[in-house]
Image: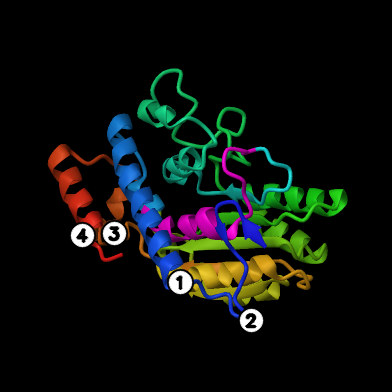
Amino acid sequence: MTSQTGTVAPAGNSYAPDQATIDRLRERAQFIRLETVRLIDIAKTGHYTSVFSAAEVFSALYYDVMNLRKGEPKWEERDRFTIGKGHAAVGLFPIYADLGFFPTEWLDDYTRLGSPLGDHPDMRKVPGVDFSSGSIGHALSNAIGIALAQRWTGKHYSVFCMMGDGEMQEGQVWEAALFAAQNKLGRLIGIIDRNGFQLDGRVDDVMAIEPLDEKWRAFGWEVHIVDGHDIAAVTELLRRLRADDTRNQPAMVISKTLKGRGVSYMETEPGWHLGWLDPSDADEAIAEIKSQVI
């Protein structure tokens, strides 16, 4: 299968991306981080670290794994994506512009009066957004509705749903987990950004969620654990899950990440969940991101 944003078809029985693809996806992850810094500077507040932990997954999904058409955000056969941690939308908007879903000029007015691009994604205003999110806990239920629609319409798209690890403290998530397994939604692929932090501090200090993999298996899901910053491993796993037409249970990927990955002082300071870099700090962050080996 060939996606309009990348080649998904494996060579032989391997889903491993070649080196050129790995390099391209790493570069796109850097692009996501750099654009996040730029857009938050326009807004003067935003969620850097929630994007940085998910940048490799975003890159793998939108530039390789998901079946999309550039310039056609409403293509009926496209794969769908819902996100519970909607405050990370600032890292998705540059991707949507890059894929031709809306004019790149929209980015320059991020969060300004009259702009369709706000701190959270709005599917009524932003082409490319499949689910308006803000309050966490609802993304998986919405993804289930989309997956059921896929089954009933006979279309072949897959549905991806990213949630934060703090989102695992929401009861609605587990009700949805039971429903998805009961209804054998094999084209539903969940991703948990397991970066260890939420707004109020360390996830496991607020309410412990481990053993996370065993819990999802007990709820009837196929579970995979991956280093969320290893772009090759992430891409290979998501390609394989996307291509599997025989799976009769939903799949959950636990993506182990660092909140703030790419800017060292953000990786060790949980207070960066929401903030703003003054010009000198922004220059330092940009330089560090650009210095990382592709």
Tell me the crowding category of disc 1: few under 14, some 14 to 19, or many 20 or more residues within 10 angstroms, Cα based: many
| Secondary structure state at the residue bearing disc 4 | helix
Query: Label 2, on which residue?
Result: 13
Marks 2 and 3 close (CB-CB < 8 Å): no
Q: Nearer the viewer, mark 2 or mark 1?
A: 2
Sequence-first tag of 3 and 1: 1
Q: Nearer the viewer, mark 2 or mark 4?
A: 2
Residue farthest along the top direction in this orientation:
114
| Secondary structure state at the residue bearing disc 1 | helix
The residue type indicated by label 2 comes to Asn
The residue type indicated by label 4 comes to Ser
Query: Label 3, on which residue?
Result: 262
Q: Which residues are magenta?
A: 52-73
Give residue 288's position: percent from left, percent from top.
20, 56
Query: Label 4, on which residue?
Result: 291
Marks 2 and 1 close (CB-CB < 8 Å): no
Real-space Cα distance between discs 2 and 1?
A: 16 Å
Tell me the crowding category of disc 2: few under 14, some 14 to 19, or many 20 or more residues within 10 angstroms, Cα based: few
Query: In this picture, is 15 found above or below 207?
Result: below
Q: Quadrant of residue 214?
A: bottom right
Residue found at x 64% / y 54%: 67
Query: In this picture, is 159 found above or below 111?
Result: below
Residue found at x 41% / y 56%: 55
Marks 4 and 1 close (CB-CB < 8 Å): no
Query: In this picture, is 174 found above or below 132?
Result: below
- Rendered image: mark on residue 232: 1
